[in-house]
Amino acid sequence: MGNEAVRWLVVAERDLKAVRNNLLGPEPTTEIAAYHCQQAAEKVVKAALIAAGIDPPRWHNIDDLVDLLPSEHELRGALVPLGRFTPYAIAYRYPVADPDVLPDVPAPDEVTAWLEELERVKTEVAAAIGGRRGRPTS
């Protein structure tokens, strides 16, 4: 169980790498960085679920995923705020007839703050599941 949860954190780190690349790369795209923030948040929550012995469903709604954890779970408080990333799971990935239904494109400094928060939460989850690791190289 611990190894599987750690594998989810490794994949979350790849999403965080994509966030960094889309913020700092030669052609920054904050919309895609926001999408990868959602993806990283979802994977971090699913790692916590797996570590708690809960098989995560193939849902993308982070609030619904966090709600699967017992209310007294030690990581719940750190994971609840990640629910705000749910709208970015599909926003900007496909053309839409009415762009007004999309969330506002976040500013680069906002996404940078999200990245820092996600790194912190990922580290907290890793510590809680005993998966203390450095950043994967891939």
Image: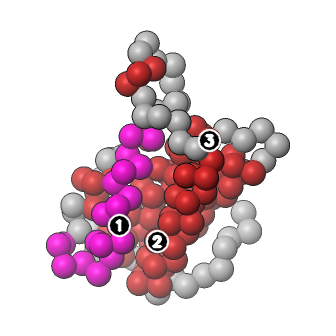
Q: Would residue 132 appear left or right of 60 to someone viewing this image?
A: right
Magenta segment: 70-88
Name the residue type under label 2. Answer: Val
Q: Would residue 104 appear left or right of 36 to someone viewing this image?
A: left
In the current view of this chain or complex, which residue is farthest to the top?
97
Q: CA distance from mark 3 to mark 1?
A: 23 Å
Label 1 environment density (alpha carbons within 10 Å; few <14, some 14–19, many ≥20): many
Residue 79, visible in the rendered structure: yes
| Residue 62 - label | none
Q: Percent position (x, y) of residue 127?
A: 47, 84
Residue bearing the label numbered 1: 79
Label 3 environment density (alpha carbons within 10 Å; few <14, some 14–19, many ≥20): many
Residue bearing the label numbered 2: 121
Query: Of callouts 3 and 2, which one flags the residue occurring earlier in the amino acid sequence?
Result: 3
In the current view of this chain or complex, which residue is farthest to the right?
26
In this rendered view, identify the residue nearer to me: 47 or 33. 33
Q: CA distance from mark 3 to mark 2?
A: 21 Å
Q: Are marks 2 and 1 in contact (CB under 8 Å)?
A: yes
Residue bearing the label numbered 3: 30
Query: Which of the image's four quarters has the N terminus?
Result: bottom left
Give the mark toward the camera: 3 or 2: 3
